[in-house]
Structures are given as structure tokens and as C-alpha cells.
Image (cartoon, helix red, strand yellow):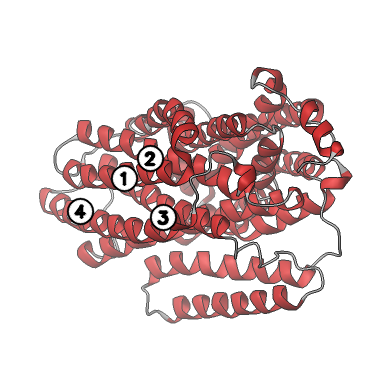
Amino acid sequence: MSSPASTTTAVCKPQSLRAAWPALLALCLTMLVEMVDNSILNIALPTIGRDLGASPTDLQWIVGAYSLTFGGLLMVGGTMGDKLGRRRTLLVGLALFGLAGLAVLLVTTPVQLIAVRALSGAFAAFIEPLTMSLIFRLFDRDDLRTKAIGIIMVVSMIGFAVGPTLAGLAIASWPWQALLVINAPVAAIAWIGVRFGVAKDDPADRRSGGTDVVGAALSVASLGFLLYGFTAGVENGWTAPLTIAVFAAGILSLVGFIWREKTATDPMLDLKLLALPTVSGSAILQTATMIAMVGVMFVSTQLYQFAWGWSALQAGLANLPFVAGMLVAGPFVDRAVAHFGHRKTSIGGVALVLISLVIWIFALSHGFIWCAIGMLVMTMGMRTIMTTGAVALLGALPESHTSIGSALNDTAQELGNAVGVAIVGTIMATVLGSTLPQGAWDSAMVAGFVHSQQISFTILAGIVLVMSIFGIRTLTDSKETEEH
């Protein structure tokens, strides 16, 4: 039963999306700039390599530095938001993220660019979990929360999908530095929107207690090492000394983190939250979905550019069905959650993801129209699971833990990202070798590639199915997050 104070707060919250449009727009811009930055440099790597004299290893770190600091610091960013105030922490993160974009103008060496990308990833980790947390707490009605999170998911995937397209267009006319400098004005607009469109932090919603510096350091180390371990395995082999050492460091850090959080007076992450079935189940579902999604996106880029000989711009435009699928799924998700609840809606989403992987197995050797259909079906399933999972996970947590909950949500996705690339990359290297020729491939290479990825997608389907069985069992048929 709600207290009078909480009832008053609920009445003051917006009762429609239109009433909250300034805050909603600002938070969408916040998510957009972070997601575009996550994928925009891949197309520009050849140009960057020539301009800075970067080696292949340098180029790998230019891409990897962002994801490592981003994934490693997500829970730290979420914790800071819960303790210091979500709006305040988001404003600081946006300001620093914009400045990091401007810092690229001073870059003259690959090492400097790697440092800038690492800083950008770190500051992005203070943006994404707080954006989701604020969008969830902006409303007190479950249907509006579902719609708002759905909008955020669409914006997120649009940013991720159109990043390569925008990069292909920009590189044709502007220096590659423009791809990162653009972050500054967009972050500034988002900062203004959050500053004037989002209500100030309520001290009653903050987490009390001290700061778990040791836990934060161990969480960064464990996630950073484990995420890099998948990259090292694909690049150097799974039995290489470097790969084994990185994974060992990650496992030791993870064990240390768990021990620390169990014994600390004020832990960064209360492990009791992970014991909540809805929290763990939602995280498992989102990891499984991201494994499939990233695996397909990783393969499709090489299919279009190398197997089919398309330009970078054509390959970027070919990703637009991903965006269309997110838009098409919107009305379905809202109605499905209202009528069937989280469990049954998630079952439908998982079914769509599995069907899409079957379509992709066929599409690899039958042309783009089938790829487009596979993308549409996959993102319809992905939006269903991501939206439902995020609402269920955040709704299962107390008000004071929504930022760390959102960070858990994002960390699950980031782990899925790493695992998806590792699976398809490993199978590709096993079948074709670790070094692929640049430019158009001959018919034998194309046939080998298609065969390797048909194996990959079959394995991905099996992983999604098994993980989803465990995840779906933990969800309820409730149509309101407050009941979880």
C-alpha cells in the first residue's frame, strides 16, 4: 500500500508521453549520441589507419578501447547515479562525453586516439544506465513506462544501425575527425534538455551508505578482462598464453568482486538483487538476444562488403531493415504486454529471434531480400524482449537501485555482444583461417564463409533457446511492474 508521500509523487508525474516530451526528447538524444558513437568508427578505420599510420593492432584497440571501458564501468556509473543523484551524474557524464569528442581535434598519433576512445567509453558508462533509469522513473504508469522504454530501445538501435551509414556518408566529404566532433553539439543539446526537462533528484530516492571503492575496482577489472578475453581469443586463439592469462585475471577479479560484495558493509552491488528471479531472468534473456543480434550484424557487414563486393555506404544502408523492424514491433509490444504479461510476450519475442536465425541460415546463400526479412523478424523479436526485459528488471528493484539495475541490464547486453562476436569469429577462423583477404572474395572463399556462418547461426539458435528457457521461467504473467 502506497504511503501518502508516494501517492503525491505519483500524481505529479506525467500521465502521458506528450506531457513528458521535453524530458523524453532529451533522454532519447542522450541514448542516440552514445549508441552512434559505439558503431560509427568501424567504417572509417581504413582512413584512420592511413592518416595516423596505425598498425592493425592499433586499429583493433581504437575500436576495443571504447567497449572495454564502457562495459567495465557500467556498474560504477549506475552506482554513482544511485548514490549521488541520477540527473546530476548524467549531466556530468554528458558534459565529459562531449569534451572527449572535441579532444579528437588534438589527436596526432594512434595512442592518443586510443586514449580518447577509452575516455569516451568511460563517460558513456555514466550516460546509458542513468538514461534508462530516468526514463523508467519518469512515469508511474506501467503502460507509459513500457512505451517510453520502447521508444528508447528504438532510438538506441537506430543509432547503432545508422552509425555505419552516417560514417560512410561523412567520410566521402569530411575528415574522419568529424565523426567524433559531432558528439559535442549533440551532447550539448541533450545536456540542455536534461537540465531543464528532467526534475531534480529526490534525495529520498538515493542510496545511503559509503562508497565501495574496492568493489568498483574489482568490477571494472573483472568485466574488462572478461570482455577483452573474448577479443583475445578470436584474435590470438583460445589456447594462446595471452588469452588464458586474460581470462584467468578476469575470473580471479570476479571471484574477488563476489567475495567483496558479500562481506562489504556498503557493497556497490547488493548480490541479493541477483537472487530476485525477475532480475536474473531478464538479464539472461537480454544476453541471449544480444548474442544473436550482434552475431548477425558482425556477419552481415562482411557478407555485404567482401562476399558480395558492396561499398561501405551500401553495406551501411543495408542495415536499415533493423530499424524498420524496431518500429514495426512497437504497437505489438505495447498490446502484448497489456494482454499477456511479460512471460508470454517474451516467449513470442524469443520465437521471432529463433525464426530469424533460421531465415538467416537460408539467406546467406539466397540474396539480400531474405537477409532483409531476417533483419525485420530479428529486430521485432529483439525489441519485444529488450523492452519487456528492461521493464520487468527495473520494476523488480526498489527506487534506490534503479541505476545499478539499469547498469546490470546494460552489462548483460555488453556480455552478449562479446560472446556473439566470439562465437561467429571463432567458427569463421576455424573454417576459413584467422586472416581473411581484403576486397572481393573468390567463389571458394564465399562458399566457405557461407558454410561457416550457417554453422554459427545454428549454434546461436541453440544458445538462444537454452538460455531463454531459463530466463522465461523466472518471469511472471503480471502486466504491472510494481507487482514483481
Alpha carbon separation for disc pair 3 and 2: 12 Å
Element type where label 2 sits in the image: helix
Closer-to-camera residue (282/127) = 282
Q: Which residue is mark 3?
A: 288
Which circle's residue, 1 or 4, is located before the other in the chain?
A: 1
Q: Quadrant of the N terminus?
A: top right
The residue most toward the left is 444
Which circle's residue, 4 or 3, is located before the other in the chain?
A: 3
Element type where label 4 sits in the image: helix
Residue kind at label 3, given as amino acid type: Ala
The residue at 50%/76% (across/down) is 247
Residue kind at label 4, given as amino acid type: Gln
Element type where label 1 sits in the image: helix
Which mark, residue 351? 1
Which circle's residue, 2 or 4, is located before the other in the chain?
A: 2
Alpha carbon separation for disc pair 2 and 4: 20 Å
Q: Which residue is mark 2?
A: 381
Q: Which residue is mark 4?
A: 454
**Given contact means CB atoms under 8 Å apart, are the residues at marks 1 and 2 in contact?**
yes
**Given contact means CB atoms under 8 Å apart, are the residues at marks 4 and 3 in contact?**
no
Residue kind at label 2, given as amino acid type: Gly
| In this view, 450 is above or below 379 | below
Q: Quadrant of residue 138?
A: top right
Coordinates of residue 380 in the picture (x, y in percent): 38, 35
Label 2: how many Cα within 10 Å (few below 14, some 14–19, many 20+): many
**Given contact means CB atoms under 8 Å apart, are the residues at marks 2 and 4 in contact?**
no
Q: Nearer the viewer, mark 4 or mark 3?
A: 3
